[in-house]
């Protein structure tokens, strides 16, 4: 029995999928919509929608995406802004910076980039008295090769 029925494939929130780029489709340009979008082919450019975006398992997307929610089963190279949730499923791969309200990465999913979580919460634990020269106590800055290996 499959937990959460993820074997059934991509499932989007309420509303039907109004725009579909099939697996044999290659598109370059800017796609704007008020509805849900599904990409199963190759897409280059930008996607902007008030709805949700599904990137199918065979899809290859080189685009910046702005949407309510984004579900990634395939591969995306580009920045993603989601006012709702970004889901990177077990076969999904994202290379780029993301700005999201919520993030879910399944085991096996790949994310390479920076993440900013949107929200009204204040970083209470990070606030506090600041010491002049506190940064000097942290040690010398990392060299570029050391910084890359520390990030992995």
Image: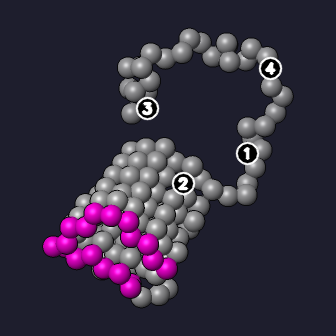
Dot 3 corresponds to which residue? 151
Up/down of 129 relative to 10, above or below: above
Q: Residue at x 54, y 15 (%)?
A: 141
Q: CA distance from mark 3 to mark 2?
A: 19 Å
Among numbered discs 3 and 4, the one appearing first in the sequence: 4
Is residue 117 shown in magenta? no
Question: Residue at 77% across / 44% down in the picture?
Answer: 124
Crowding around mark 1 (Cα neighbors within 10 Å: few <14, some 14 to 19, many 20+) is few
Label ID, residue 54: none
Earlier residue among tags 1 and 3: 1
Q: Which residue is mark 1?
A: 123
Instruction: Assign a secondary structure to mark 3.
Output: helix
Q: How far, Cα to Cα, is label 4 from label 1? A: 18 Å
Q: Which residues are magenta?
A: 17-34
Which quadrant, please, contains the C terminus? Answer: top left
Residue 84: x and y, percent?
A: 56, 68
């Amino acid at each position: 029995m499959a937990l959460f029925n993820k074997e059934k494939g991509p499932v989007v929130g309420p509303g039907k999928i109004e725009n579909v780029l099939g697996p044999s489709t290659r598109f370059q340009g800017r796609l704007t919509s008020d509805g849900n979008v599904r990409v199963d082919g190759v897409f280059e450019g930008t996607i902007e929608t008030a709805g949700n975006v599904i990137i199918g398992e065979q899809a290859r997307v080189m685009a910046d995406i702005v949407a309510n929610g984004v579900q990634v089963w395939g591969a995306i190279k580009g920045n993603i802004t989601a006012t709702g949730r970004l889901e990177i499923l077990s076969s999904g791969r994202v290379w780029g910076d993301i700005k999201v309200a919520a993030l879910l990465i399944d085991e096996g999913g790949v994310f390479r980039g920076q993440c900013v979580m949107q929200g009204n919460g204040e970083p209470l634990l990070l606030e506090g008295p600041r010491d002049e020269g506190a940064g000097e106590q942290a040690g010398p800055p990392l060299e570029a090769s050391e910084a890359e290996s520390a990030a992995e």
